[in-house]
């Protein structure tokens, strides 16, 4: 199942055992491409990521029959969902599967980008509005004595 959002497509992968892995394709609405990829991936082994990639991404940098860049972005989201499902299936934190922890904290309070207006916020559709929103987040989240 893929859910299209404003700037990302969230990928929900479900294994035969009912384990859910989540990933995201940070390339706008790629739901149709993710759903098309599903047909090629059903029944594959979670540990065979390279075989999955070869089914979804052309082996060359350019092909007149498809968009290699979009295929790589879709596969990136699929790969993320596969790793998430693998970690859950194997009962191992994802950082262990990827070779060990690099840090214990990641300082982040907000993701800044253009946003469409919603009931909960007015949206930011210009660079000035994004900058104002950033200033608001600084006031709200930055400790005064930094």
Image (spheres, rainbow, N blue to C red):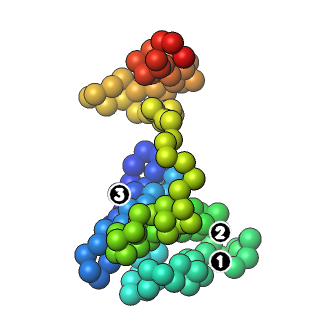
Q: Quadrant of residue 6?
A: top left
Task: Check disc 3: other Cα within 10 Å, few if <14, some if 14-19, many if 20+.
Answer: some
Q: Which residue is mark 2?
A: 68
Image x and y of residue 144, in percent: 48, 12
Q: Distance between the Cα atoms at labels 2 and 3?
A: 22 Å
Q: Quadrant of residue 42?
A: bottom left
Whichever of labels 2 and 1 marks the residue nearer the N terminus, that label is 1
Task: Check disc 2: other Cα within 10 Å, few if <14, some if 14-19, many if 20+.
Answer: some
Whichever of labels 2 and 3 marks the residue nearer the N terminus, that label is 3
Image x and y of residue 1, in percent: 33, 67
Q: Are marks 1 and 3 in contact (CB under 8 Å)?
A: no
Task: Check disc 1: other Cα within 10 Å, few if <14, some if 14-19, many if 20+.
Answer: some
Q: Distance between the Cα atoms at labels 2 and 1?
A: 6 Å
Q: Which residue is mark 1?
A: 58
Q: Which residue is mark 3?
A: 3
Secondary structure of the residue carrying tag 1 is loop
Q: Residue at x 53, y 56 (%)?
A: 101
Q: Name the residue nearer the viewer: 6 or 93.
A: 93
Q: Residue at x 45, y 63 (%)?
A: 94
For the C terminus, the image quarter is top right
Q: Are marks 2 and 1 in contact (CB under 8 Å)?
A: yes
Left or right: 3 in relation to 69: left
């Amino acid at each position: 199942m893929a859910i299209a959002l404003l700037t990302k497509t969230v990928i929900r992968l479900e294994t035969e055992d009912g384990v859910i892995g989540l990933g995201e394709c940070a390339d706008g609405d790629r739901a149709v491409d993710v759903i098309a990829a599903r047909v090629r991936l059903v029944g594959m082994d979670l540990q065979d990521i390279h075989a999955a990639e070869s089914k979804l991404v052309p082996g060359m940098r350019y092909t007149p029959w498809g968009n290699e860049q979009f295929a790589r972005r879709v596969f990136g989201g699929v790969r993320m969902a596969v790793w998430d499902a693998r970690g859950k299936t194997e009962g191992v934190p994802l950082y262990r599967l990827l070779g060990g922890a690099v840090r214990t904290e990641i300082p982040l309070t907000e993701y800044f980008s253009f946003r469409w207006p919603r009931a909960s916020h007015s949206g930011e559709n210009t660079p000035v509005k994004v900058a104002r929103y950033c200033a608001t987040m600084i006031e709200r989240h930055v400790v005064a004595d930094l």
